[in-house]
Structure formats: structure tokens, C-alpha cells
Amino acid sequence: MLLAGVVFARRQKTTKSYFLASHSVPWWAIAASIVATETSTITFISVPGIAWAKGGDFRFLQIVFGYVVARLIIAAVFMPCYFRGELVTVYELLQTRFAPSVKALAATLFVVMRTIADGVRLLLTAYVVAALTDHLGVTGAIIGLGVIMTIFTLTGGIEAIVWIEVVQLAIYIGGAIAAAVVLLGDVGFDHAMALGVANEKFHLFDFSFDLTKTYTFWSGLIGGTFLTLSTHGTDQYMVQRYLCTDRPRSAAKAVIASGLVVLVQFAFFLFIGVLLFAFYGSNAPVSAPDQVFPHFIANHLPTGLSGLVVAAILAAAMSSSLSAIASTVVSDLFPRRFLQGDDRRAMRLSRVIVVIAGIAQIAVGIALQQTTRSALGTALAVASLINGPILGVFFLGATKRAGTTSALTGMSAGIIAVGIVAFATKIAWPWYTVVGSVTTFVVGMLVAWTSTGKSVASSPSPRAL
């Protein structure tokens, strides 16, 4: 990883190459990068634990249906907007309709959310490293992994990240297949299927409209669609990868292809969870479902093969958001007057931000060690909390009436509403993005409609997003 960063560092002379790879990456590589970015360590470790756990089954897969629907919408509606002009971040679109304060709020929410989510990713990977060592411990593993991730991003930029993610995807899919083959050799396909059926592990559809249930058909279709519209449509972490291609058609092919791969991949990792249930039963020597697959890897895979799978997990941990955070801070949050159009100064600032963000993610990983909740659920819940209001303000930007005041009021209401829902009710996290985005849009439009027309006049440009 570090060597790859050094190799790609030779081409990181400008912010365009550092943040956008000079628009030179082919669509298929972007598709692989999207899959690796979206799934990565969290999928590798947490999804098998979902199916293995008591009461666990395939219902998680329902949320992927929404992922696919959202990708079709992004490809058809969102993608052309990204390639109008020379965007560095997706939040620059907001400044075509609103004052800079709206862009700054959206960008700040993104930085906070990604820092927490990638801290969770570091923690998951540290579980595996700690399981394989006697003295390092989870905290030491988090620090070591975080330092390597930061140096890799610091030197190689987004181009190194994308191409390493292509290799990483092949490695961790190969490692997962190898682990599944070993499990099948131990428990047998027929036995695993019989146990899975007897314990309802293959239960897929739940058509009940219960907002407190995490995985139902409706939470998956509606909540999954809204979540992916936000994470893949208005989140710099993903949009940065689209902007590494040369045209919207290439980016659209990448995002649609990634949806099909993700659907198959999630189903496969859930099946590994069923195999783990057949191997361990319901009493594996672990304290949380996220730890069951790492325990199998560390203790039951043959020497050499376990090394391949660990390499896959370590590689997956390098799907860093540090480049996206740095591009957002430099382009959307840092006062332009201090940069004075100096690209070399912007590059130096970008590298400083990468280091600071890396330290922050290490701190989050260390702080979350005591949680017993599924790390996948934690990461997606955090994304749902914050991305909803951001998606809502993009919806407002697509109208001609909403202005800066209505956008800021709507986002504030969305943040408050989703906070209340998350911490004061039992509503499941797939609905958080729906609540946040709909509240933001409705409140914003009400403010616009009840104003005297000043909200429209305050917009820097009359053109909708």
C-alpha cells in the first residue's frame, strides 16, 4: 500500500490530479472502486455476522433493492449535473443556487459523518489484526492501520486510492470465496442448507409496514433508495470517484454496474454467515456478531489461506475518505482569499488536512471500541442521520422558489427531526434519511412559500441544479 502511494505520488502535482485523477480513470475501474468503497471491511466482517446472529437471516438484502433503484435515478438525473463546469466537490453545486453558508453547512455535515464512519471501519479491521497478535491489542491496531492509511492517501491521492481499490476488490472477493470453500468442506453444503432452512436463515422478504423493524421490504425499497440517493448522489466520498472519469455516460455505467455487483456480493456474504452458523452453531466464542468471521479466519483457516484473507481485510481498510474530506475542506470550507488562486498552496493545505482527518478517524475508532452494536448498522445509521438533510437541500436546489433562508431553515429542521427520531423513538435507521430529507424539503418549501419573495432573489443564480 505504501509503495503504491509512492508510485502514484509522482503524478500528484496539482489539485486536479490529486483530487480528480485528471479525469483519466476508465468506467470499469470506477465501478470496482465504488463497490470496494461502499462495502469494504464493513461488509467483509459485519454482513456474515448479521446472518450468523440469533434471529439473523437474509432480510438485510431487502435494503439492497433500494440501492439499485437509487443508482438508476442517479445515472439518469444526477450524473449530468456533476459534469457541468469543472467541479471539484459535489457541494459546489449548491453555490449555484444558494449563498456559501448552505454549501458550508452541507460540507461540514459530510466531514463529520465520514470521520465517524471511517473510524468504525478502522475499528473493524483492528479486530482482525488484534485477533492475530498477542500484544498489539485493538488500540494499537487502530493506530497502526490509521497511520498507514494516512500516509498512503497523503502521497498517492485519489488516483492511487481508486486503482488500489480495484486490486483490493479482487483480493477480498477471492479471500471470501476461499473462506467459503473451507467452510463448505468442514460442514458440507447439504448440512449447511438444512440448518439454514430449519433456523429460517434464508428468510428474505418481510412485507410488514413496521417502522421499528430495521429490515423490511418497505424500509429497504424506500429507505434504501433515499439512503443511496444521499450517499451516492450527494456525498463527496462517492461523487469524487465519478468525477475521475471523463464524461457522464462513463460515470453512469460505473454506478449502475456497481449496483449489480453489490447485490450479488451482499447475498454471498450473507451465505457465508449461514455457513458460520453451521460451523459454530449459535455459541461462537465471541462477544459480538462482528467478531465471528474474524475468529474463524484467525483460528480455523489453514496457514497461508488465512494470510490471504487477512490481506484482503487489510487492503479493504485502505478505502480511505481522507482525500474526499481534504477536497471538501479546501474547496468548500477554507476561505478562498487565503489561497489566492495558488494551487501549490492548496496542495500543501490538502496534505495537512489529510493528516488531521486521519488522526480524527483514529480517535473515533479508539472511542468506539466498547460498542456491541453491529458496526455495519452503526456506520449506516450515522450516514442516514446526516445525509438526509444534505439530500433534502439538493431537492430544494432543484426548485426555483427555494432560497438561502429556506434552505438553511429546512436543513436545521431536518437535522432536528432526524435527531429526535433517532434518539427519542424506536424507528429503525433506514427511515432516518427519509425523515431528514423530506423534513428539510417540506420545511424549506413552506418557508419559501410564506416569504415575501426575497428567498428567490437571494439566490446567486436562477438556474436550478
Image (tube, helix red, strand yellow):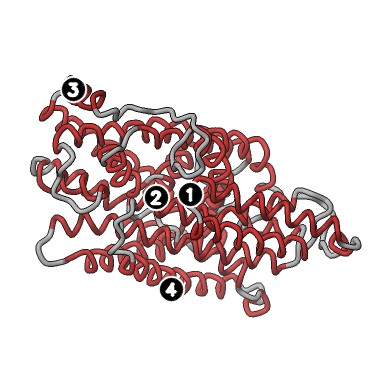
Which residue corresponds to mark 2? 377
**Kind of residue sitting beneath label 4:** Ile
Q: Sort mark 3 into few (<14), some (14-19) or many (20+) by Cα contacts within 10 Å.
A: some
Q: Position of residue 458 (x, y in %)?
A: 84, 65
Which one is earlier in the sequence, the residue at label 2 or at label 1? 2
Contact check, label 4 and label 1, Cβ < 8 Å: no
Contact check, label 2 and label 1, Cβ < 8 Å: yes
Which one is earlier in the sequence, the residue at label 4 or at label 1? 4
Label 3 secondary element: helix
Which one is earlier in the sequence, the residue at label 2 or at label 4? 4
Q: Nearer the viewer, residue 199 or 139?
A: 199
Which residue corresponds to mark 4? 356
Q: Is residue 456 visible?
A: yes
Q: CA distance from mark 3 to mark 2?
A: 29 Å
**Kind of residue sitting beneath label 3:** Phe
Label 4 secondary element: helix
Contact check, label 2 and label 4, Cβ < 8 Å: no
Label 1 secondary element: helix
**Kind of residue sitting beneath label 2:** Gly
Which residue corresponds to mark 1? 429
Q: Position of residue 415 (x, y in %)?
A: 60, 61
Numbered disc in front, either 2 or 4 = 2
User: In the drawing, what numbered circle is on residue 189?
Assistant: 3
Left or right: 269 with respect to 81? left
Q: Nearer the viewer, residue 165 or 205?
A: 205
Left or right: 269 with respect to 423? left
Residue at image point 43% right, 62% down: 116
Q: CA distance from mark 4 to mark 1?
A: 29 Å
Q: CA distance from mark 2 to mark 4?
A: 26 Å
Position of residue 352 relative to residue 428, above or below, is: below
Q: CA distance from mark 4 to mark 3?
A: 48 Å
